[in-house]
Amino acid sequence: MNWNDYLLYMIFMTGLTGSIWSVIWLLVCQIVKKYCSSRTIYKYQKILIAGYCLPVVFLAELIHLRAADYTVGFLFTVTPSMEKVLDIVFWIWAGGVAACLLVFFVKALRLYWEYRKGIPVSIKDKALLQQTCEKLGIKEEVRVCRNYNVASPFIFGIRKPCIYLPVYDCSETELEMVFSHELMHYKQGDVFWKPFFCLLCCLYWFNPLIWVSMYWFQKWSEASCDESCCEDFYCSREYFQTIYKLMEEITDGGEQWEQDGKKNRNRTTLTSNWYNNENELRWRVKTMKSPHKIVKKGISIAITTMIVLVSGVSTYGAELGAKKAYDCVYMNTMEGLEEASASSTEYEEYVMDIDDLEGIEIIEAGEGNEDAQTMVIDTVGTIGWTVRSGNGVKSSAFYEPSSGSVTIMVKIVPENKEVKVGIVGEDNLFHYVRGKGTITHTFSVPAAGNYRVYIINESDTTVTADGCYIF
């Protein structure tokens, strides 16, 4: 396998984990949103991000492959036909990643270009921002500016965060609410998490579930900020009336509201969003009105544990299904070179007394006798495998020099079941023999490289294989 094959495997396995976690989160969200606060749900969703970030399944399988003496199945092994398909898939995936990165890069560049110059705010507004930062316990410096291109307030920037305001007149109380909302985004880390989620969407652009997850991530981040502001500082009625009033004054309502809503959606993937459209604002109000019970810390930990356990079990089940499907693809596309088995010859067995060997001199091997040298075996690998019907088992990789050989000696039980026994090199060609019962064969190594011993069971019964291979 090439490095791009390993990369595709990692993306697929990690994406599968993230997809399962996304489905579980969406289902759990429908249940717990009646009992949990928006802030709690938003924290749960950050756990979801780990499913797309941590290649746990991939690394576990890879470490097992490297450390174990043998592994069941054909994972991390490809046939020549699969190699060609994977090359095409890799370039399609890489092209999609490049296209998505380009789109987000253009958005970020336009964001910087349009808002790089702003109208200086008054000293009074700066003092109000400083007071709000102190109220929220934010010690880092946060800048503020106004710009005619801004349709609604937002905060942007990881190292040097800045709150961008539209050019309009508002009271000190209204401006404080705007600052509180945007600083809540900064406090809960949205200036980092949103661009990071965009990067994940680029990597998994082919997966619709991550786009759905990003959509809900943005909505719950806004709801979380609304809840924090209303529960800690403001009356919810006054808070949302202020939002609606400011939006009406800025946009003049009607078609302009929708036009500015579209403009917000062009940048909302990278920034916070004071408002998106009227429907989204109604959803935020409805979410805020829903009676939320106070969830105790123990219950919150129990819910989190349940989500992790269910996600883990589901991921394990899906992994087994994916590996089984992969094994079927491998066996259906496998290309091999069948050799004649040395053990296919039938021998007649005789019994005689050792004393009947008259006139024959028996000498000890290896005791100064040049005519009776023993064979020195460099390395021996043991075989004690159980091979299920329709599956295969492979050994760990070993290096064999050019013009070398690999000798396999194995006994198959039940003895009437035929299996394929052979080796696979870096060219992904399977050199094998068919046989039943005791199979012994020496394979010539076509070229230096890493090899594995394989036993493939195409019979309708599980077989056991005991023996060794010498290389």
Image: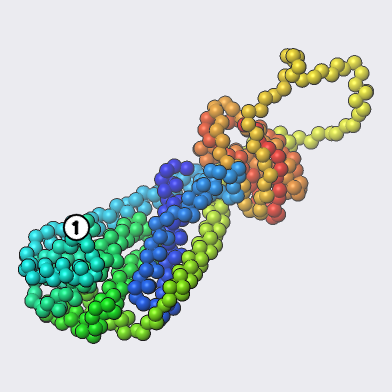
Q: Is residue 243 above or below residue 4?
A: below
Residue pointed to by mark 1: 160
Q: Quadrant of residue 46?
A: bottom left
Closer to us: 404 or 156:
156
Q: Is residue 322 above or below residue 361?
A: below
Q: Position of residue 259 (x, y in %)?
A: 16, 74
Q: Tag 1: Cα neighbours inside 10 Å, few (<14), some, or many (≥20)?
A: few
Asked which secondary structure carries label 1, the reply is loop
Quarter of the rendering occupied by the C terminus: top right
Residue 418 visible within the image: no
Q: Position of residue 226 (x, y in %)?
A: 27, 76
Q: Is residue 189 left or right of residue 162?
A: right
Q: How many marks?
A: 1
Q: Quadrant of residue 244?
A: bottom left
Say how the picture is coloured: rainbow
Q: Quadrant of residue 133?
A: bottom left
Q: Position of residue 391 (x, y in %)?
A: 62, 52
Q: Is residue 157 above or below residue 177?
A: above
Q: Position of residue 16 (x, y in %)?
A: 45, 60
Closer to us: 162 or 167:
162
- Residue visible at 27% across and 77% down in the picture: 232
Residue 456 visible within the image: yes
- Residue visible at 75% across and 47% down in the picture: 413
Q: Is residue 135 left or right of residue 365?
A: left
- Residue visible at 38% across and 62% down in the picture: 49
Callout 1 amino acid: Lys
- Residue visible at 61% across and 30% down in the picture: 405
